[in-house]
Amino acid sequence: MDFVLYGLGRWLHIMAGVMWLGLLYYLNFVQVAALKNATADGTAAGIAKHVVPRALLFFRWSAVVTWLAGAALLGPLFVDAFREGRVGIAAT
């Protein structure tokens, strides 16, 4: 059962991380340029009113899920991961 929970936790961590990074690139490279062009046209209201809040909502929650799933995967090694930067058996 632990193997299944660990596998699901790892899958959740990876998928949320992919979503987080994908939205980061979207927000920085696609949306910024699109908003600049839409503002010049005077049509930015639709993007700023409907797309931006939803993209930021998913960005924030994917970051939270990535972080919490990673912390759950570390389990009892969570404190050690931040104390010395080394985790588990590799720590010598």
Image (cartoon, rainbow, N blue to C red):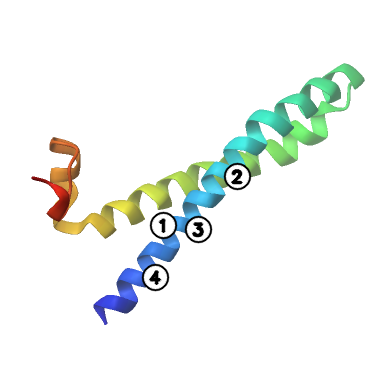
Residue at 25%, 77% (x, y): give it: 2
Q: Is residue 41 left or right of residue 22?
A: right
Residue that mark 2 sits on: 22
Q: Is residue 6 left or right of residue 88?
A: right
Residue 44, percent across and down?
82, 27
Q: Name which residue type carries label 4.
A: Leu
Residue in the foreground of this view, choosing between 59 and 89:
89
Alpha-carbon neighbours of circle 1 within 10 Å: few (<14), some, or many (≥20)? many
Q: Is residue 30 left or right of residue 63?
A: right
In the image, is residue 37 above or below residue 83? above
Kindly indicate whether the residue at mark 1 contacts the one at mark 3 (C-beta within 8 angstroms).
yes
Alpha-carbon neighbours of circle 4 within 10 Å: few (<14), some, or many (≥20)? few
Q: Which picture quadrant has residue 8?
A: bottom left
Tell me the distance, in whole angstroms, between the alpha carbons under discs 4 and 1: 8 Å
At numbered mark 1, what does the secondary structure look like: helix, strand or loop?
helix
Q: Which picture quadrant has residue 27?
A: top right
At numbered mark 3, what does the secondary structure look like: helix, strand or loop?
helix
Tell me the distance, in whole angstroms, between the alpha carbons under discs 2 and 1: 14 Å
Q: Name which residue type carries label 3.
A: Met
Tell me the distance, in whole angstroms, between the alpha carbons under discs 4 and 3: 10 Å
Residue that mark 3 sits on: 15
Q: Which mark is residue 13?
A: 1
At numbered mark 2, what does the secondary structure look like: helix, strand or loop?
helix
Alpha-carbon neighbours of circle 3 within 10 Å: few (<14), some, or many (≥20)? some
Q: Name which residue type carries label 1.
A: His
Residue 3, percent across and down?
29, 77
Residue that mark 4 sits on: 8
Residue in the foreground of this view, choosing between 7 and 54:
7
Q: Name which residue type carries label 2.
A: Gly
Tell me the distance, in whole angstroms, between the alpha carbons under discs 3 and 1: 6 Å
Residue at 81%, 29% (x, y): give it: 45
